[in-house]
Image: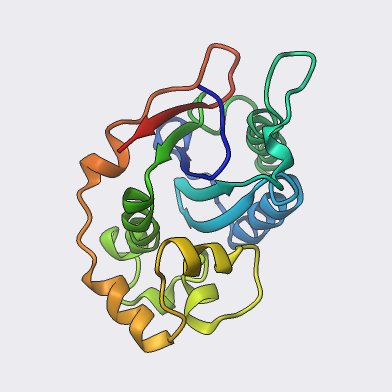
């Protein structure tokens, strides 16, 4: 199944053997800059959270998204190819930094296609990751997620208007904070339908919900 118009996607992966993928603080901001440079031209980034040994993204594609175009060789959509580029280019940078070789990530990026209802739940799940891991006690204490972009309505890499329109995310900061704490997430819904990427090494997406 390929990426398609008017759909949300949960994209995630973790370090190979659960190793750290952000060994230094500056690596988080470097990865975010790569997200913006590599992906934002081809899709809408709606939410993200970078954790010490894994990452979560929520992407949305519409008729303006060039990520749906097909590459001639190999027969991949642009966004499929760009997700592979994101991982491989970041891996090279970290291996150079740490004087290592080999895989930084698990081989395949996981991608789940989400209904709007599940996308709304997944949006909050992504932001809840640092609290569930007990890295912080409050959403505002973790600087490497899109939560602060929504809470402060600050500039960043996310297209917040999509979340406001389709996911009913409140623009008021206190309402947003309240909702973020109230949503109960069943992780089976968010993660268990994931499937590894194709043998080409690119992402496979799954219709869910």
User: Which residue lies at the image location 67% right of the left edge and 39% below the top edge?
Assistant: 86
Question: Is residue 96 visible to us here?
Answer: no
Q: Nearer the viewer, residue 14 or 159?
A: 159
User: Which residue lies at the image location 55% right of the left edge and 74% below the top edge?
Assistant: 149
Q: Nearer the viewer, residue 37 or 168?
A: 168
User: Which residue lies at the image location 54% right of the left edge and 62% below the top edge?
Assistant: 162
**Could you say where residue 205 lies in the image, as x and y percent from the top left?**
47, 28
Q: Quadrant of residue 32?
A: bottom right
User: Which residue lies at the image location 20% right of the left edge and 61% below the top edge?
Assistant: 184
**Could you say where residue 49 lies in the image, as x and y percent from the top left?**
47, 57
Q: Quadrant of residue 5?
A: top right
Question: Is residue 165 visible to us here?
Answer: yes
**Could you say where residue 92 lies in the image, as x and y percent from the top left?**
71, 35
On the picture, is 135 further left or further right than 147? left
Q: Which quadrant holds the C terminus? A: top left
Up the image or down, 22 lies above or below 183; here it is: above
Q: Which of 75 and 14 is in front in this view?
A: 75
């Amino acid at each position: 199944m390929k990426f398609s118009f008017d759909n949300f996607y949960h994209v995630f992966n973790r370090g190979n053997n659960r190793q750290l993928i952000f060994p230094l603080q500056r690596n988080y901001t470097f990865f975010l800059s790569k997200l913006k440079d590599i992906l934002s031209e081809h899709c809408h980034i709606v939410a993200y959270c970078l954790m010490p040994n894994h990452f979560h993204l929520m992407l949305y594609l519409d008729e303006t998204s060039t990520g749906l175009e097909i590459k001639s060789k190999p027969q991949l959509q642009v966004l499929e190819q760009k997700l592979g580029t994101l991982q491989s280019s970041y891996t090279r940078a970290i291996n150079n930094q740490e004087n290592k070789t080999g895989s930084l990530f698990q081989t395949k990026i996981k991608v789940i296609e989400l209904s709007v209802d599940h996308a709304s739940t997944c949006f909050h799940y992504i932001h809840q990751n640092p609290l569930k891991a007990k890295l912080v006690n409050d959403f505002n204490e973790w600087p490497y997620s899109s939560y602060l972009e929504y809470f402060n309505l600050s500039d960043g890499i996310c297209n917040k208007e999509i979340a406001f329109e389709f996911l009913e995310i409140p623009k008021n900061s206190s309402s947003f904070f309240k909702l973020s704490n109230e949503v109960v997430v069943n992780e089976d819904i968010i993660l268990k339908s994931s499937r590894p990427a194709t043998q080409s090494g690119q992402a496979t997406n799954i219709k869910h919900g």
